[in-house]
Structure formats: structure tokens, C-alpha cells
């Protein structure tokens, strides 16, 4: 892996120049209204906005990757990610300024390719953090890792935004979108049906891994809909249900009792849609609760460990995953103004409350 020298000095100066510019946030509602008429004029406006905005956001992350604490920036996996970001910055800046639809098509192909290049950023970063963790074993306190944790929160949140903006733009080129679909957004998404699909996916993985799986009961009005990004909701519910299934399965594995079902309740309030996922998997001790949202505590193996070529798919679907499910799910919730809270009763079970903002007015958070 060629180190930093591979990039010209002028390119790196350019990265630093763009990384100082101000980012511009977009709301769910704006994406939805703007994207509902994908005229050539709107596609041009969108591409011109992205040509500047993506350069700024990607440059900021590239700069941040250079100065991480504890020598994390020097780890081979992190250098690899940094190179992806600098490459992507260069690709965007090398594009002719978008003036007509020919430029727009060329630019769209470039950002499509960037999205694919970055598919494995999360597991690759996880690998870098793991490489660091092995070295540090005893040297530092988990308190000191707060800095790395906060960086990863910012970094992954920004990545969600970049992927959303690229995906949204690319999808607007779809000549015949399904009804009620604007890019990644579904204007009449049924949270009950997305929760059902996600929990069936999680349950089939549990079946595959353990040979059996607890029942899952879903309560809520299946006809209730609101605008949201189904892929984001699917990912969050999938992670939460997977955790619950694992807890219940492990707790009842050697018992002759029937394992209790997992309950999913969908409530629609005026401001929030809340999805509660309740299990009787024994809960988490209170002292362990702060740790569940950190990136550094997973005991699970990183799926990239055994595939040194890093050529694995984005979503790694084993029951254990690599410990990023909760913190990343919380970022997806926060991206559109929601949140994720975990309440636990040690000795009984855990309730996860997933709050999704109904209004769609909140601006993207811009780390």
C-alpha cells in the first residue's frame, strides 16, 4: 500500500483549502420536495450543488483522517481509507464544472463510482481501530478513547450524509420510479411493514445460526405511513432485533422453557414515530450500558480479519457482526432528527426505543 507520498503536494493543498469551507445541510423534506420533479433543470441544480458540497465534505474527512490520536492515522487500514477519500476528492475536482446535461451525466457516473469505492469504509475503519486496540491493550484507559469514539461518530455520520446525497441524486435518474418513491425516500412508508421485513431478515439469520429463533410479535397500525428512508429504518430495526434475538436465544438455549417472544410496538405521535423493541433476554448490567454505544468494545471478530483482501460486502450478516450495530444505528436515527435509546432491566430484558422525527424538517447534522 503506497503511503501518503502517492499524492501530489498541490492536490493535498487543495484538499486543505476545500476542507475549510462551510458545509450546507439539507433536510429530508427539501430532498423530498426537490426530488419529486426530476426535471433536467433540477438535475443540473442538484449536480452543481453536489459538485461543491461533496468536495467540501470529503475533504474534511480526509483531513481528519490525517490527525487521529494514538497513531491511528498510521495504521494500514486507516491509510487505505484516507487514500479512498483523497482519490474521491480528486475525482470530483477533475470533473468539468457542470454546465449542461452532458456534464451532469459524466458527474453522476463519477459520484456513482465514488459511492462504490467507499462501500467498505466501516469494516475497514473497524479493522484499523482493532489494529490499534491490539497494541494498546493495557496502555490506555477507555476514557482516553473518547476522542477516537467522537471522531468515529462524526466520521460515520458524515458518511451517511454523503451516501444519502449521492444515492438521492443518482436515483433521480431512474426513468420510472415506483409510486411514492423519491430517490431513497418513500413518501408513504409503513413503519410496520418495514419492521416486519427487517425482523424476518434478522430471524432467518438467527435460525441459520442457532437452528431456532424466538417468535416476533408486531403491534401497530400497518396502514399508518409517513415519509422516511426505508433502507435506514430497515438497517436500524434489523440490528436491534438481531441483538434481542441473540440475547433471548443465548438465555434460553439450554432451558426447557419456551423462549419468550420479542415484541415490536410502533406508535405514531405528532412529532415522532417511535418503535419500541422489547425482549426478555436478561438485560444488560447498568454499568455496561454506556459501553454499548462505543466502537471499541466489541468482543466479536471483525469479518475482515479473515479476509485480508478487504473484498467483502458492505453488510456483514452474522449474528455477532462486529459491534458497530448500535452506535451506527443511533447515527442513522440522528441523521434525520431522531434518536435511539436503550433501557435495560438486568435479570429481565432490554427495551430499545427508536425515535424517528415525523416532520422531516430537521437539517442534516454536519459534523
Image (cartoon, rainbow, N blue to C red):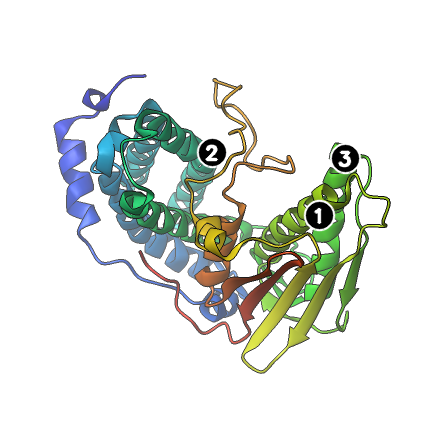
Residue drawn at (20%, 38%) of the image: 67
Vertical placement of residue 48 versus 180, above or below = above
Instruction: Find residue 46 and report its horizontal and vertical position in percent.
Output: 40, 57
Residue at image coords 86%, 44% = 256
Q: Residue at x 34, y 56 (%)?
A: 49
* Front in this rendered view, residue 130 or 51: 130
Tell me the CA gap for discs 1 and 2. Answer: 23 Å
Q: Quadrant of residue 117?
A: top left
Identify the residue under disc 3. Answer: 210
Which quadrant of the rendered structure holds the C terminus? Answer: bottom left
Q: Nearer the viewer, residue 354 or 223?
A: 354
Q: Residue furthest bottom?
A: 270
Give the mark, 1 or 3, whose residue is nearer the N terminus.
3
- Secondary structure, mark 1, is helix
Residue holding disc 1? 245
Residue 60 visible to the viewer: yes
Amino acid at each position: 500500500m503506497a503511503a501518503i507520498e502517492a499524492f501530489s503536494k498541490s492536490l493535498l493543498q487543495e484538499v486543505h483549502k476545500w476542507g475549510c469551507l462551510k458545509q450546507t445541510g439539507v433536510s429530508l423534506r427539501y430532498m423530498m420536495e426537490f426530488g419529486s420533479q426530476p426535471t433536467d433543470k433540477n438535475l443540473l441544480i442538484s449536480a452543481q450543488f453536489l459538485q461543491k458540497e461533496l468536495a467540501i465534505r470529503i475533504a474534511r474527512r480526509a483531513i481528519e483522517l490525517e490527525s487521529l490520536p494514538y497513531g491511528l492515522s498510521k495504521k494500514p487500514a486507516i491509510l487505505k481509507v484516507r487514500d479512498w477519500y483523497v482519490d474521491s476528492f480528486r475525482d470530483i475536482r477533475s470533473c468539468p464544472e457542470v454546465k449542461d446535461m452532458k456534464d451532469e451525466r459524466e458527474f453522476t457516473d463519477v459520484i456513482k463510482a465514488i459511492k462504490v469505492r467507499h462501500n467498505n469504509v466501516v469494516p475497514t475503519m473497524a479493522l484499523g481501530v482493532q489494529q490499534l486496540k491490539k497494541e494498546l491493550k493495557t496502555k490506555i484507559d477507555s476514557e482516553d478513547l473518547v476522542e477516537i469514539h467522537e471522531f468515529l461518530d462524526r466520521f460515520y455520520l458524515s458518511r451517511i450524509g454523503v451516501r444519502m446525497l449521492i444515492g438521492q441524486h443518482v436515483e433521480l435518474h431512474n426513468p420510472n420510479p415506483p409510486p411514492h418513491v423519491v430517490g431513497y425516500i418513500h413518501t408513504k412508508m409503513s413503519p410496520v411493514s418495514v419492521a416486519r421485513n427487517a425482523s424476518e431478515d434478522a430471524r432467518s439469520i438467527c435460525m441459520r445460526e442457532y437452528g431456532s429463533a424466538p417468535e416476533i410479535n408486531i403491534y401497530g397500525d400497518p396502514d399508518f405511513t409517513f415519509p422516511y428512508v426505508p433502507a435506514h429504518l430497515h438497517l436500524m430495526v434489523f440490528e436491534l432485533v438481531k441483538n434481542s434475538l441473540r440475547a433471548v436465544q443465548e438465555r434460553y438455549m439450554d432451558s426447557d422453557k419456551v423462549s419468550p417472544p420479542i415484541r415490536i410496538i410502533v406508535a405514531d405521535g405528532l412529532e415522532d414515530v417511535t418503535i419500541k423493541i422489547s425482549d426478555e433476554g436478561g438485560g444488560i448490567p447498568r454499568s455496561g450500558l454506556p459501553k454499548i454505544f462505543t466502537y471499541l468494545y466489541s468482543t466479536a471478530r471483525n469479518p475482515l480479519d479473515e479476509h485480508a483482501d478487504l473484498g467483502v460486502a458492505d453488510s456483514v450478516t452474522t449474528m455477532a457482526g462486529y459491534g458497530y450495530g448500535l452506535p451506527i444505528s443511533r447515527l442513522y436515527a440522528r441523521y434525520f432528527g431522531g434518536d435511539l435509546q436503550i433501557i435495560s432491566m438486568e435479570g429481565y430484558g432490554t427495551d430499545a426505543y427508536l425515535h424517528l422525527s415525523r416532520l422531516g424538517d430537521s437539517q442534516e447534522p454536519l459534523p
